Image (tube, rainbow, N blue to C red):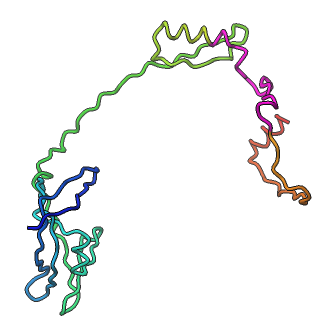
Amino acid sequence: MVPATPSLTGFSGETTWPLGQLRLLVTIGNITHSNKAWINFMIVKSLSPYNGIIGRPGLKAIQAVLSTVHGMLKFPTKEGIVTIRSSLLIPAECTSIDTSSPIPREKKTRPANLTVPLHPNFPDQEVVVGGLLSDKGRTELCALLKKNLDIFAWKSSDMTGVPRSIAEHRLNIREGCPLVRQKKRGQAPERTKAIQAEV
């Protein structure tokens, strides 16, 4: 056994430091059709249903092509290409799991949100207040919203706009370029009606 310097990283990101490294001559296949290669194995102190796992460098060393979809492994030998089909051995830990009765999940009930009208003269101007707020928090929030009623824009005509000192829009067009008229885009019938009503 030789000391191993690289660490191994698992699927969930955990890092495992190997105890050492061992180089073994691996023979894959049967007596008549086989391929041999020297493969490095990392020795790890870990619970696993497998005795050894051959990684990408090992598969490259034996010139194997693996298809997990078909459950097959192909590799060349002196006699030709050999195909090994998997016999799907399920580890004992997987077969001992009971899946007959699913664990019931608790349904968390959330309090319903409350719709509160802000202006007494306009009952259609409503806001939705979260149901998780305490009574005191709800009343304070409603009082704050009613106090600042003038901030809300209930329709587009209520929007006053932004002063030019804060923000200004300009088209970034090079002077002297000819104007190009864009092709008219068709709209769905309901959108056309809404556009006509707005204009």
Residue located 59% across and 10% down the image: 142
Characterize the magenta stretch by its predominant secondary structure: loop
Vertical arrangement, residue 152 with respect to residue 79, above or below: above
Q: Quadrant of residue 124?
A: top right
Q: Position of residue 32 (x, y in %)?
A: 10, 89
Along the viewing direction, whichever of 84 and 12 lies nearer the viewer: 12
Vertical arrangement, residue 180 with respect to residue 131, above or below: below
Question: In the rendered structure, does residue 157 fall within the stretch colored magenta?
Answer: yes
Question: In the rendered structure, does residue 93 fall within the stretch colored magenta?
Answer: no
Residue located 41% across and 22% down the image: 110
Along the viewing direction, whichever of 60 and 102 lies nearer the viewer: 60
Q: Is residue 149 left or right of residue 94?
A: right
Q: Quadrant of residue 111?
A: top left
* Residue range of the region highlighted in magenta in the rendering: 145-168
Q: Position of residue 49 (x, y in %)?
A: 11, 58
Along the viewing direction, whichever of 176 and 113 lies nearer the viewer: 176
Residue located 35% across and 25% down the image: 108
